[in-house]
Amino acid sequence: MKQTQAIHAALKKLMRSRGKTYADAAGVLDLSEASIKRLFSQQALSVSRLEALCDWLHVDVQDLVRMSREQEPLTTQLGEDQEAVLLADTGLLLVAYLLLNHWTQEEILDTYGFTRPELTRRMFRLQELGLVEVLPFDRVRLKTARNFSWRRDGPVQRFFADQVLKEFLSSAFEEPGESMEFVSGMLSRKSILELQGRIAELAREFDDRVESDLGLPAEDRLGSSLYVAFRPWEFSDFSALRKADRIKKF
């Protein structure tokens, strides 16, 4: 749904919720009811008329825009073919990552070796995939839902598991800002469940901090990755020495 169409739809919904009719709106704008119906059907209300109707309904235009965005269907997941499109072009995957992290076009052009036409072409490709909406004046609006995720065992997850994660774990984790702990021991089922809950809590905190830092300029943020894994596990060479009836499962 285009932004203008969504704003008109939100305004109609707000009028209905307040018990207002086209005839009421016609009186506010000093137009005929037929003219009001035509303006709504053609999504042709001017900014000044939108402002007048918002004043009449006791809402700001900014609030109306926010309500219009809430009505739009957002992308929660891409299809396998769409994910494959991203992986076929490393530059496209990078631009998607940067835009999802609220980089501006100018920040991307200043940091990476794209020409403006190359960047614009990739942004419109991402629009076709449903990830962003390209707006006038070099603006981009995300079309992804808060719970957007890559497909489980889909092309992107397999790419990260096969290539990105291997590169990530190849570090000695001794540089500034790096940290890694690997500990092993024997735990009760109760302790295992509690630690799994703590891991989920840590992942949520990471996500919350990403969200809270989105308003900062790109130059003040560092690409960061957190990898935490936990499972009841025994080294396979040890397990091979167990008696068949002594194999433990959670």
Image (spheres, grey):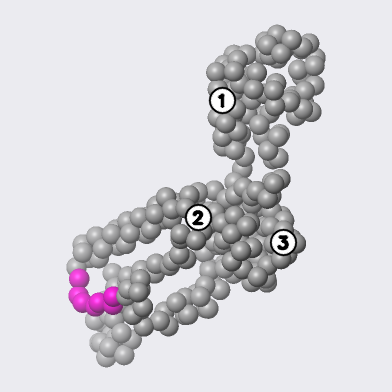
Q: Is mark 2 on a helix, strand or loop?
A: loop
The answer to which of marks 3 and 2 sits earlier in the sequence is 3
Q: Are marks 3 and 2 in contact (CB under 8 Å)?
A: no
**Could you tell me which residue is drawn at 63 percent across and 54 percent down?**
131
Mark 2, residue position: 217
Image coords of residue 22 (percent x, y): 70, 14
Whether residue 125 appears in this view of the structure is: no
The answer to which of marks 1 and 2 sits earlier in the sequence is 1
**Could you tell me which residue is drawn at 69 percent across and 57 percent down?**
123
Whether residue 128 appears in this view of the structure is: yes
Quarter of the image where the N terminus is located: top right
Image coords of residue 72 (percent x, y): 62, 40
Q: Which amino acid does label 1 sit on?
A: Asp
* Distance of label 3 from label 1 (alpha carbons): 35 Å
* The residue stretch that appears in magenta: 181-187
**Could you tell me which residue is drawn at 57 percent across and 31 percent down?**
62
* Distance of label 3 from label 2 (alpha carbons): 20 Å
Q: Which amino acid does label 2 sit on?
A: Pro
Mark 1, residue position: 60
Q: What element carries label 3?
A: helix
Image coords of residue 202 (percent x, y): 33, 59
Q: Relative to residue 240, is residue 91 drawn left or right?
A: right
Give the answer, above or below, for where 37 lies relative to 175. above
**Could you tell me which residue is drawn at 35 percent across and 55 percent down?**
205
